[in-house]
Image: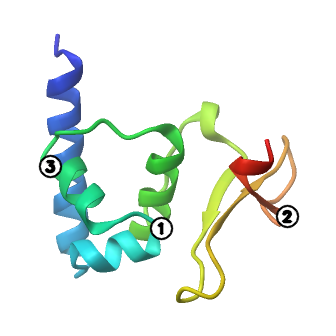
Amino acid sequence: MGDSSQVARHFGRNMKRLRREAGLSQEALGFSASLHRTEVGLLERGERTPRIDTLVKVAAALGVRIDCPLLDGISWTEGTRTVVPGGFSLSGPGEDHAAAPFDPLDA
């Protein structure tokens, strides 16, 4: 069984593969996920384990689904340039993800 550093490295390899398949640079992925490109590099090298919000952002930016009941109702919408930041949408069971964006700073 792997330890957390092995999990981080495996996640990073998957993330890098999916980013390349999508034809995105680290900078483009970072922009779409509201992450700095150095954060993308740290994640891809397995030097950092993503938080849940980072995982949701990266999955949305890569256009991949996260099939996990613990994350049902949590989605990320990319911002537009630097004018409008991206944001989370939260919904309950049976609701769509059209709820107002969630700002973690308001919590």
Q: Residue at x 25, y 79 (%)?
A: 24
SS for callout 2: loop
> Disc 3 residue type?
Arg
Q: Is residue 34 above or below residue 81?
A: above
> In screen coordinates, is 89 left or right of 5?
right
Q: Is 73 in front, or is 94?
A: 73
SS for callout 3: helix
Q: Is 99 in front, or is 27?
A: 27
Q: Is residue 101 above or below residue 43?
A: below
Q: Is 14 in front, or is 36?
A: 36
Question: At which x and y percent is residue 60?
Answer: 50, 64
**Mark sitting earlier along the chain (3/1):** 3
SS for callout 1: loop
Question: At which x and y percent is residue 78?
Answer: 57, 75
Question: CA separation, marks 2 and 3?
Answer: 33 Å
> In screen coordinates, is 5 left or right of 40?
left
> In screen coordinates, is 2 left or right of 86?
left
Would you identify the image quadrant in which residue 6 lies?
A: top left
> Disc 2 residue type?
Ala
Question: At which x and y percent is residue 97?
Answer: 78, 60
| Residue designated by label 2 | 100
Question: At which x and y percent is residue 7?
Answer: 22, 28
| Residue designated by label 3 | 13
